[in-house]
């Protein structure tokens, strides 16, 4: 327990210095880290291979194993991401509003760091660098608890980051990596609201519930992505087919992959057979309701559990709905406030969908896979928040800050 408290206290002290660090100092560290990751890619790959070997022995396969893998290309993308974050404008000190009040006071709203951010995530070692870089650029210290499946990879990446911090006279406590799997240790940290300002759990239902039940620290959750696409009767069929198929197959284990397609019954006879054939040709298992099973071959009959499930695999649930209202009702019942899309050429229908579906991102005529910080112009993201308080949707640099008031007077008193 004392180790956890010491870790949090050290991070708090580091955050105090990071909050006033210059933009040049932060960018220098990020660019140096990018260079080190490039030059030490072999070390990272070897550490990652040990994780992959251990994961394979425990039965992890398919998309979950892919999420754990750091290939040479993935490491290169990690380094490029660091350089991109270094090139982004520094949000700290940014004045978002400035005005005078009747008393003559000059009021400014100014962005400032949150402080210490703890992130608990599962088997994605690239998150270790992404989370550190974004927190660091926004003036925050971070405490990172990665999944045990990626422990060796995370340790190798954190060691390189610590070297860069030391080389530039910044506290290594700016990045604290936890390798403990003891839930009691995590409970201790979740009670340290005097030192930790925000916790971001990024993972499955069990992890989110654990943090929600035990945390005294404000939480922004990156919950599972049960993402829907509604193909309206006024959809461009060719466009809809491309969007639905690639929204699943391009990266099936990501949170913004589509898990369910809802098809308007007026176009179901022509659209369903084509959709099923395209999905199956890409290796996707289609689980459909009775109306889908009637219209296509080799469809697995869907159960009630298939609606509202994040498969994270080459599995897609497909359902025929009577109209727009039925599609909206389905999404509201089974969605997770992550990403939902409509394919339609009818602007009024699109407007109704986007106003009634209050997901973190609603999309018209494009893939759910575009709910991503880089794709939406934020430069990078620490995750996609499905909480509506503080941040909602992709969390970039600005979402890792808060705003305070700076007020200048000329002798006013009350």
Image (cartoon, grey):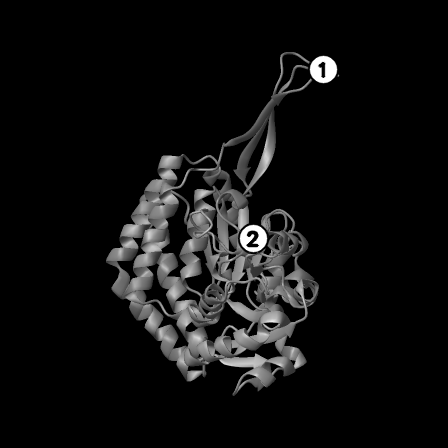
* Residue 197, percent from left and from top: 59, 48
Q: Residue at x 41, y 83 (%)?
A: 57
Q: In x, y percent, where is residue 332?
A: 68, 63
Badges 1 and 2: C-beta atoms under 8 Å apart? Answer: no
Q: Does residue 209 appear in this view?
A: yes
Quarter of the image where one finds residue 41: bottom left
Q: Which of marks 1 and 2 is in front?
A: 2
Identify the residue at horizontal 48%, vertical 36% (top origin): 92
Residue situated furthest bottom in the rendering: 298
Q: Which of 166 and 354 is in front in this view?
A: 354
Give the position of the C terminus as an image quadrant. Answer: top right
In which quadrant of the rendered image does the N terminus lie? bottom right
Q: Nearer the viewer, residue 265 or 284?
A: 265
Where is 321 relative to 10, above or below?
below
> Where 272 falls versus 366 (above or below)?
below
| SS of the residue under disc 1 | loop
Q: Distance between the residues labelled 1 and 2?
A: 42 Å
Looking at the image, tell me whether mark 1 or mark 2 is earlier in sequence order: 2
114 left or right of 71 in image = right
Q: Is residue 130 left or right of residue 105?
A: left
The residue lying at 43 percent from left, 58 percent from top is: 128
Say which residue appears at 56% left-offset and 43% top-offset.
114
Disc 1 target residue: 413
Q: In this view, does 391 lie above or below 291?
A: above
Instruction: List the single residue furthest toward the right.
Output: 414
Q: Residue 393 carries which label?
A: 2
Q: Residue 222 at what x, y percent from top left?
A: 57, 59
Q: Is 79 drawn above or below residue 138 in the view shown?
A: below
Label tally:
2
């Amino acid at each position: 327990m004392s180790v956890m408290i010491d870790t949090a206290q050290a991070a708090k002290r580091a955050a105090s210095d990071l909050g006033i660090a210059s933009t040049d100092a932060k960018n220098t560290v990020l660019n140096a880290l990018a260079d080190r990751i490039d030059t030490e890619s072999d070390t990272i790959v070897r550490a990652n291979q040990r994780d992959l070997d251990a994961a394979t022995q425990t039965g992890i396969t398919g998309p979950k194993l892919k999420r754990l893998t750091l290939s040479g290309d993935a490491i290169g993308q990690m380094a490029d991401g660091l350089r991109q974050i270094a090139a982004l404008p520094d949000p700290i000190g940014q004045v978002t509003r400035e005005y005078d009040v009747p008393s003559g006071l000059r009021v400014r709203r100014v962005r400032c760091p949150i402080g210490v951010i703890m992130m608990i995530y599962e088997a994605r070692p690239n998150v270790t660098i992404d989370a550190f870089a974004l927190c660091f650029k926004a003036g925050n210290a971070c405490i990172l608890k990665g999944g045990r499946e990626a422990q060796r990879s995370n340790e190798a990446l954190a060691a390189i980051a610590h070297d860069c911090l030391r080389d530039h006279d910044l506290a290594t406590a700016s990045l604290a990596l936890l390798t403990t799997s003891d839930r009691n240790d995590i409970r201790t940290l979740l009670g340290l609201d005097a030192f930790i300002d925000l916790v971001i759990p990024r993972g499955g239902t069990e992890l989110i519930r654990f943090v929600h039940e035990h945390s005294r620290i404000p939480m922004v959750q990156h919950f599972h992505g049960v993402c829907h696409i509604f193909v309206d009767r006024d959809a461009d069929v060719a466009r809809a087919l491309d969007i639905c198929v690639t929204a699943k197959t391009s990266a099936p284990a990501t949170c913004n992959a589509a898990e369910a397609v809802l098809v308007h019954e007026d176009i179901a006879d022509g659209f369903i057979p084509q959709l099923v054939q395209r999905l199956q040709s890409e290796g996707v298992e289609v689980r459909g309701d009775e109306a889908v099973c009637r219209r296509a071959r080799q469809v697995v009959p869907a159960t009630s559990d298939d609606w509202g499930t994040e498969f994270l695999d080459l599995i897609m649930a497909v359902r025929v709905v009577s109209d727009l209202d039925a599609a909206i009702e389905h999404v509201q019942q089974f969605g997770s406030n992550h990403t939902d899309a409509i394919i339609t050429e009818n602007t009024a229908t699109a407007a109704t969908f986007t106003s009634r579906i209050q997901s973190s991102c609603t999309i018209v005529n494009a893939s759910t896979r575009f709910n991503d910080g880089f794709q939406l112009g934020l430069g990078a993201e620490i995750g996609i928040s499905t909480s509506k308080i503080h941040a909602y949707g992709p969390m970039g640099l600005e979402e890792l800050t808060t705003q305070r008031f700076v007020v200048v007077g000329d002798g006013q008193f009350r």
